[in-house]
Image (tube, rainbow, N blue to C red):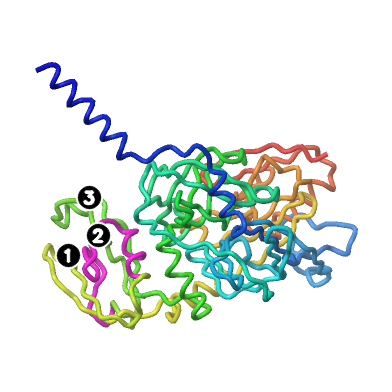
C-alpha cells in the first residue's frame, strides 16, 4: 500500500511539472524582438510666468500687491520631459500616456538612433492615454495587444521603457495583483507588477512572454522619490484598446453617460436598506435632463445591475457605463424602498454632457514658476480636493515640476501640495510667491514648509535655502 501511495505521489508531481510553464532561462530573445517597437518620447513645453519690475516686494496680503499687478513683466521658459511609448502599426502610430505629452509644444519620438517629429492624434486624460503619429513615410515594426483578462497573478511580465532618459531598458518581474484602484483616474483598474518601473517608463509597454502588450505602464508607488520599490501599475490592454481605437477613429473618446453622481454603499447603508451585503452604487444626485433623469432614476436608488453586468462596488459602475455604446438601450436593476425594480434608458455620451464640458473648462490649470525655489506650481483646485479626499477648506498649491537645482529636490515630489510657508497659510500661487520672495529678501537661511504628500499625510519640512 505504501509503495502504491509513493508511486501515485510521484506521478502527480511529474504531471504537475510537465503541465507547468518553465521559468525562462533568459529574456534576451524576447528583448531583441520587442526593443525596435518601443520608443523614447521627449517633449518641450512653454511655461509662462511673471516677474516684478520693482526692486521691492509688498508683504503678503498687502492691498498694494493687487494695485501694482499690471506692472508685472511676463516671462517664458521651456520645460522638457521624457517618457516612453510603443508602435502599434507599420506607419508609425505610437501609444503613450497622456501625462507624457500633455501641454507639449513639440514632441520628438526616438526609434533606435533616429528621431521623428510627432503630432497628437487624440488624447484621453480620463484614462491617461494618448495616440501619436510620427511625421515620416518610414516603415516600422509594430507590436500587438494581448488579452489582458487572461493575465494572472504570478505570470511573468516584461517592461521596456526609458527610465531617467538612459535609453531602452528591459526589466522583468511578475504580475503582483489585478484590478488595483489607486484613485489616479476615474477608471482605475490597474495591473500591478514588481517589474521595475521608474521615471521615464510612463507610457511604455508591459509584455507577456508571448511578446504581446498586456498593459501600459503608468504609475508607481515610490515614497520619498526613492525610485522603484516593486510596486508599479499598468493600464490593462483590453480597456486601453477600446480608447485607443476611438482616438484613432474619431480623435476623441465616445463614452457612455448615465448622468448620476454616486457614492459607496457602506455596511450601515446596506443594513438600513435591507440589502444582504454592501453592494452596488448609491445614487447621490441625478443630473437634470440626463438619461437617468428621463428614465425616472432618483437620488437614494441603489444600482445593482447595469446592462446585464453586476455592479459589485461603486467604482464598477463608471467603468461599465463608459465602455457601453453611446445610444444603446440598457436595462438597470435598482434597489428602491427595499424592493428590486427595473428601469430602461437610452445611454447618452459623456463628452457631450454639460457636466463634462464644465469639468473640462475647470480643468485648464495655469502653471507658474517659483523661480527662487526652482519649482513650478499650480493652484489647488476643487477637483484636487475631491479626488484626494481632502478637507473642503484646504488651500495651497500643487507642485508640477521640480528642477534638479531646486533645494526641494529629493525632499518633495510632483503632486505634493504646499499649504503653509513659515506656518503662514497659502491661499494661491500669488501668496506663495510673495512669501518666498519676502523670506529670501530678509536673508533667512531656512524655509519651513507644511506639505501634504500623495498619501494625504501632512508634515513639516525644513529646507536650507542659503
Q: Is residue 152 left or right of residue 117?
A: left
Residue lying furthest right = 55
Is 309 in the magenta? Answer: yes
Q: Tell me if residue 168 comes above or below residue 69 in the rendering.
A: above
Q: Is residue 356 left or right of residue 10?
A: right
Q: How many marks?
A: 3
> Which image quarter is the N terminus in?
top left
Judging depth in this view, the residue of 156 and 439 nearest the camera is 156
Secondary-structure class at tag 3: helix
Q: How far across and down, in percent of the image, does residue 415 sit?
A: 59, 52
Residue drawn at (31%, 64%), measured in percent from left and top? 317
Between the residue at mark 3 and the residue at mark 2, the CA separation in whole angstroms equals: 14 Å
Residue lying furthest left = 1
Q: How far across and down, in percent of the image, does residue 257 sit?
A: 36, 75
Residue under label 1: 335
Q: Earlier in the sequence, mark 1 or mark 2?
A: 2
Residue 344 image-quadrant placement: bottom left
> Could one spot residue 425 in this view of the protein?
no
Q: Is residue 400 left or right of residue 340?
A: right
Badge 2: residue crowd in 10 Å (few <14, some 14–19, many ≥20): many
Tell me if label 3 and label 1 are in contact, CB under 8 Å. no
| Highlighted range, magenta | 293-321
Residue drawn at (23%, 49%), measured in percent from left and top? 267
Between the residue at mark 3 and the residue at mark 1, the CA separation in whole angstroms equals: 15 Å
Q: Is residue 406 left or right of residue 268?
A: right
Residue under label 2: 280
Q: Earlier in the sequence, mark 3 or mark 1?
A: 3
> Which image quarter is the C terminus in?
top right
Tell me if label 1 and label 2 are in contact, CB under 8 Å. yes
Judging depth in this view, the residue of 163 and 20 nearest the camera is 20
Residue 268 bears which disc, if any?
A: 3
Secondary-structure class at tag 1: strand
Amino acid at each position: 500500500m505504501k509503495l502504491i501511495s509513493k508511486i501515485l505521489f510521484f506521478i502527480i508531481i511529474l504531471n504537475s511539472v510537465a503541465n507547468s510553464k518553465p521559468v525562462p532561462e533568459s529574456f534576451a530573445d524576447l528583448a531583441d524582438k520587442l526593443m525596435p517597437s518601443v520608443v523614447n518620447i521627449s517633449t518641450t513645453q512653454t511655461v509662462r510666468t511673471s516677474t516684478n519690475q520693482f526692486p521691492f516686494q509688498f508683504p503678503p496680503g498687502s492691498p498694494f500687491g493687487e494695485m501694482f499687478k499690471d506692472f508685472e513683466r511676463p516671462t517664458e521658459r521651456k520645460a522638457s520631459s521624457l517618457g516612453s511609448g510603443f508602435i502599434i502599426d507599420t506607419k508609425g502610430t505610437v501609444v503613450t500616456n497622456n501625462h507624457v505629452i500633455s501641454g507639449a509644444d513639440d514632441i520628438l519620438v526616438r526609434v533606435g538612433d533616429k528621431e521623428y517629429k510627432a503630432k497628437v492624434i487624440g488624447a484621453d486624460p480620463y484614462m491617461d492615454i494618448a495616440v501619436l503619429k510620427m511625421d515620416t513615410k518610414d516603415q516600422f515594426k509594430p507590436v500587438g495587444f494581448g488579452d489582458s483578462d487572461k493575465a494572472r497573478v504570478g505570470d511573468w511580465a516584461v517592461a521596456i521603457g526609458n527610465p531617467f532618459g538612459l535609453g531602452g531598458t528591459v526589466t522583468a518581474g511578475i504580475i503582483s495583483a489585478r484590478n488595483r484602484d489607486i484613485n489616479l483616474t476615474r477608471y482605475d483598474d490597474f495591473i500591478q507588477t514588481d517589474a521595475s518601473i521608474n521615471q521615464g517608463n510612463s507610457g511604455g509597454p508591459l509584455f507577456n512572454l508571448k511578446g504581446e502588450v498586456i498593459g501600459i505602464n503608468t504609475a508607481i508607488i515610490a515614497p520619498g522619490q526613492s525610485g522603484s520599490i516593486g510596486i508599479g501599475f499598468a493600464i490593462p490592454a483590453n480597456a486601453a484598446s477600446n480608447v485607443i481605437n476611438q482616438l484613432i477613429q474619431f480623435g476623441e473618446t465616445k463614452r457612455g453617460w448615465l448622468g448620476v453622481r454616486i457614492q459607496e454603499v457602506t455596511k450601515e447603508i446596506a443594513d438600513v436598506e435591507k440589502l444582504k451585503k454592501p453592494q452596488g452604487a448609491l445614487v447621490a444626485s441625478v443630473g437634470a435632463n440626463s438619461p437617468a433623469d428621463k428614465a425616472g432614476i432618483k437620488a437614494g436608488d441603489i444600482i445593482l445591475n447595469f446592462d446585464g453586468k453586476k455592479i459589485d462596488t461603486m467604482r464598477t459602475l463608471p467603468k461599465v457605463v463608459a465602455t457601453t455604446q453611446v445610444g444603446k438601450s440598457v436595462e438597470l436593476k435598482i434597489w428602491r424602498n427595499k424592493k428590486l425594480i427595473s428601469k430602461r434608458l437610452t445611454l447618452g455620451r459623456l463628452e457631450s454632457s454639460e457636466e463634462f464640458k464644465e469639468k473640462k473648462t475647470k480643468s485648464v490649470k495655469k502653471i507658474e514658476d517659483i523661480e527662487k525655489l526652482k519649482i513650478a506650481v499650480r493652484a489647488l483646485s476643487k477637483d484636487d480636493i475631491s479626488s484626494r479626499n481632502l478637507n473642503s477648506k484646504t488651500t495651497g498649491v500643487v507642485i508640477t515640476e521640480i528642477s534638479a537645482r531646486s533645494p526641494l529636490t529629493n525632499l518633495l515630489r510632483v503632486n505634493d501640495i504646499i499649504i503653509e510657508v513659515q506656518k503662514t497659510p497659502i491661499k494661491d500661487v500669488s501668496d506663495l510667491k510673495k512669501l518666498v520672495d519676502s523670506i529670501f529678501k530678509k536673508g533667512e537661511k531656512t524655509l519651513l514648509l507644511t506639505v501634504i504628500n500623495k498619501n494625504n499625510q501632512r508634515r513639516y519640512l525644513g529646507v536650507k535655502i542659503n
